Amino acid sequence: MAKPQESERALPEYGPVTNADLTRAMWRHNITLQFSWNYERMQALGYLWSMLPVIQRVSKTKEDLIANMQRHLVFYNTNPAVGSPVIFGASCAMEEKQQGEVGDSLKVALMGPLAGIGDTIQAILLRPIIAVLAASLALSGSVSGPIIFVIFGLFWFLFKVPQFWWGYRQGIGLVGEVTAGGRLDRITEAATIMGLGVVGGFIPSIMAKLTTTVAFARSVTVDGQATEKVVQLQPTLDQILPYMIPVLVVGFAYWLLKNRKQSPLKVLLYLTVLAFALSYAHIM
């Protein structure tokens, strides 16, 4: 009787996917997804490494394992804290059901929309608010500033766990759950409006010292005597619109980002040059 070839033998790991396999895959994803981030395929290597405990179980032969690994080396990029755990959980469910190709389609369909939601909620809405709050407390000498920032990071890390299990339970139905009734657009728009409103509210407290030192001197006659009166420009601006200069600076930065399509790095460079120039001219 002919012996089966090496490639035809079942791999030692082949068998039913266990809860331990899923848990190990989840922690790999939550911790190491971006360890091998690169400009060619971005998070693909981290995704593959995270998926290995599952695909090693469902791959009967070496050829099956190689094919499954190659499938997960395609381009992948989404928000690692909000979105990717859900996608990864659903993808694990599809691999367990021997429907890996369906899981690949799910990744492609959801990584863009969930990146929009995750980036808006985490990076645009909450992270700047928490960072500004923590920085304000730290500048005032309170140790609670850095503690708050650490707790914020810990929250996002732990929040990945329920996302993974929810995505795993939803499986292929995740697409319908996420995209039903324009839910994505409403969440993104609401988060953007709230984020801009809250960040705008920080302008007076963070940039209150951004004032002008410009003053005008003029001669006036009081009781027949000529005296020189100095008029400060800043109080006049405050009467017209409190914190006018900070608001104008933020508006200028937003105009560069939104209308001129400048990168955040270039905007920071412009503002730095402008600050040095105005300070040198004794305007601010």
Image (tube, rainbow, N blue to C red):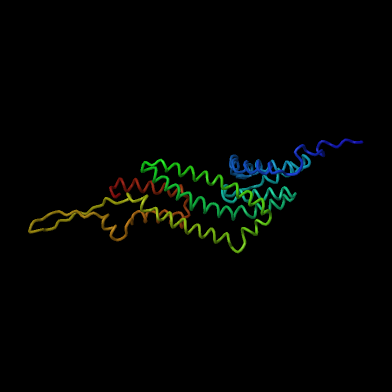
Q: At 65% across and 57% down in the image, what residue appears?
A: 175
**Residue placed farthest to the left in the image?**
224
Q: At 66% across and 47% down in the image, what residue appears?
A: 74
Position of residue 66 relative to residue 225, above or below, is above
Left or right of 221, for residue 112: right
| Of 108 and 158, the residue lying toward us | 158
**Residue placed farthest to the bottom in the image?**
181
Q: At 49% across and 44% down in the image, what residue appears?
A: 151
Specify the quadrant of the image occupied by residue 222.
bottom left
| Of 254 and 135, the residue lying toward us | 135
| Of 157 and 8, the residue lying toward us | 157
Left or right of 278, for residue 251: right
Give percent across and percent down for residue 147. 45, 42
Position of residue 190 relative to residue 57, above or below, is below
**Residue placed farthest to the front in the image?**
19
Give percent across and percent down for residue 120. 52, 54
Query: How many numbered markers are drawn?
Result: 0
Give percent across and percent down for residue 50. 65, 42
Give percent across and percent down for residue 53. 69, 41
Q: At 48% across and 49% down in the image, what residue appears?
A: 127
Q: Quadrant of the N terminus?
A: top right
